[in-house]
Image: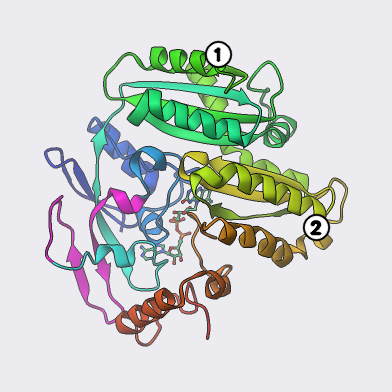
Amino acid sequence: MNALRAIDLASNSIIVEAGMRLQQVQELASAHDRLFPLSLASEGSCTIGGNLATNAGGTAVLAYGMIRDLVLGIEVVLADGRIMSQLGTLKKDNTGYDLKHLFIGSEGTLGIITAASLKLFAKPRAIATAMIGLASPQKALDLLIFAQQKCGEAIKAFELIPRIGIDFVTSHMTVRDPLSNRHQWYVLLELTASAPTGMDELLTSMLEEALAREIIEDASLAHSLEQWQHFWHVREWMSEVQKHEGGSIKHDVSVPIHHVPAFINDVTRAIEDLIPGARPVPFGHLGDGNIHCNISQPIGADKQAFLARWDEVNRLVHGLVVHYKGSISAEHGIGTLKRDLLKEVKDPIALDVMRQIKNTLDPLHLLNPNKVLPLK
Ligand SMILES: Cc1cc2nc3c(=O)[nH]c(=O)nc-3n(C[C@H](O)[C@H](O)[C@H](O)COP(=O)(O)OP(=O)(O)OC[C@H]3O[C@@H](n4cnc5c(N)ncnc54)[C@H](O)[C@@H]3O)c2cc1C
C-alpha cells in the first residue's frame, strides 16, 4: 500500500498510502514545487505509516513540528476490522474528539494506519547553513536565544555536536574537521526562507554580532553543495560512528531547552563518577531540547562488561531527566525497551487512561501486544 491517492495544491495537502517511503513523499512534494518537511536519516527506508505510528521528529521539528503537526487526517483499520477513514484536507474541523492523534505515536497498538492526508509547505528558495564553534552548551543556548531574536522563523535546524563526536566522525569516516581550529562544542545552524535572497546576509550578520558578543568562537558558512553536505554528514553520522568506538549506551531524551546545559553538565559528572573513563556523546536537536545522550565505553574497556551496565546507566540518566521535568523518550518511542520504565515516570492517571483506551479499541490485545503499556 504505497500509492499516491491525491495531491491538492490549493489546500497544500497530499494523500498517500501508509507504505510509501518518506523520501518518496518528499520527492512528490518537490515535483509539485512544495515541501514535505519531515526529514530523518532513515528517510530512504522508513514509511509514512511507521513515521506516524512513532510520531517521528527529525531535524526540522524546530520549524515545522513533529509529524503529528503535519497531519490533516488518517485512515485506520481498527482491531475489529472496521476501517475508519478521516482523510479530509480541512484545516478547520471542530466536530468532537480529534481521533487521529490517538493513533499517531501509538506504535501500532491501537490500529493499523493505511493512509494519511499530510500538509505541504512552500518550498524554500533560499538556504543558509553554518557550522559554528563555541565553548559550551550554555554558549549554544545563548546562541539559540540570540538567533531566535535576530532570525525568527527562518531557523530551520539548530543541532548541537560535541567535540568528541567530531573526533569520532573524522577518525572513522573520510571527512575533515569542519572548522580550521578545534572547539569544545559545535552548532549546525540552518536558515530557510521562501523568498529567494537574503538568507546568507542575515546569517552572516547575526554570526558576526554573536562573535563580537563572544557567544561564539568561529563559524563557517556553506558556500557550495559539497560544503553543505559535509556539514550535514558530520551531524548525520553522529550515531553511526559511535559503533566504531565499542559499546554505546543510548538515551533519546528531552528536557526543557533552558535546562539542556545543566542537564549535560550533570550527566557528564555523574557518568564520570559511575564509570570512570566512560565518554558521554550528547548531541542532537538543541532547538527542541532533544538530546541523544549516548555514552560510549571507556577506551580499551570490555564491551560486554560495559553494556551489562545498561540499566544502571539508564537509571542515572533518566533520573536526571525526571529531575529536570523532561521526557525519557523524546522521539524514538517506548516499544518494549522502555515499556516498564513508564511506570516510574508517567502520571499514574495518564497511564490508566492509556490502558482504558487500549482496552476499548483493542479488547483482545491483538495489535502489537505487550508494547508501550507496562505489563501489570
Ligand atoms: C538511521 C535512523 C535515524 C532515525 N532518526 C530519527 C530521527 O531523527 N527522529 C525520529 O523521530 N526518529 C528517527 N528514527 C526512528 C524513526 O522514528 C523511524 O525510522 C521511523 O519513523 C519508523 O518508520 P518505519 O517505517 O521504519 O517503521 P518500523 O520501524 O517498521 O515500525 C515502527 C513501529 O511502528 C509500527 N508501525 C509501522 N507501520 C505502521 C502502520 N502502518 N500502522 C500502525 N503501526 C505501524 C510498527 O509495528 C512498529 O511498532 C531513526 C531511525 C533510524 C534507523
Disc nearer the start of the sequence (1/2):
1
* Vertical order, 182 against 236 (above or below): above
Is residue 233 in view?
no
Task: Give the camera-side residue of 180 and 324.
Answer: 324
- The amino acid beneath tag 1 is Ala
Please provide percent x and percent y for residue 91. 15, 50
x, y percentage for residue 328? 55, 60
The residue identified by callout 1 is 212
The quadrant in which residue 93 appears is bottom left
Residue at point 33%, 78% (across, down): 357
Label 1 to label 2: alpha-carbon separation: 39 Å
- For residue 315, the mark is none
Q: Is residue 245 visible?
A: yes
Position of 11 relative to 249 (above/below): above
Q: Quadrant of the N terminus?
A: bottom left
Expressed as whole percent of the image width and height from the top left, the position of residue 298 reads: 83, 48
What residue is drawn where x is 18% and y is 58%?
87
Q: Mark number for residue 274? A: 2
In-image side of 343 versus 75 (left or right): right
| Residue 76 part of the magenta segment | yes
Viewer-proximal residue, 191 or 143?
143
Q: Give the secondary structure at mark 1.
A: helix
Q: Which residues are magenta?
A: 67-95
Mark 1 or 2, closer to the camera: 1
Is the CB of mark 1 within 8 Å of ligand 1? no
Please tell me which residue lies in front, 80 or 2: 80
Q: Amino acid at mark 2?
A: Leu
Q: Residue at x 80, y 57 (%)?
A: 274
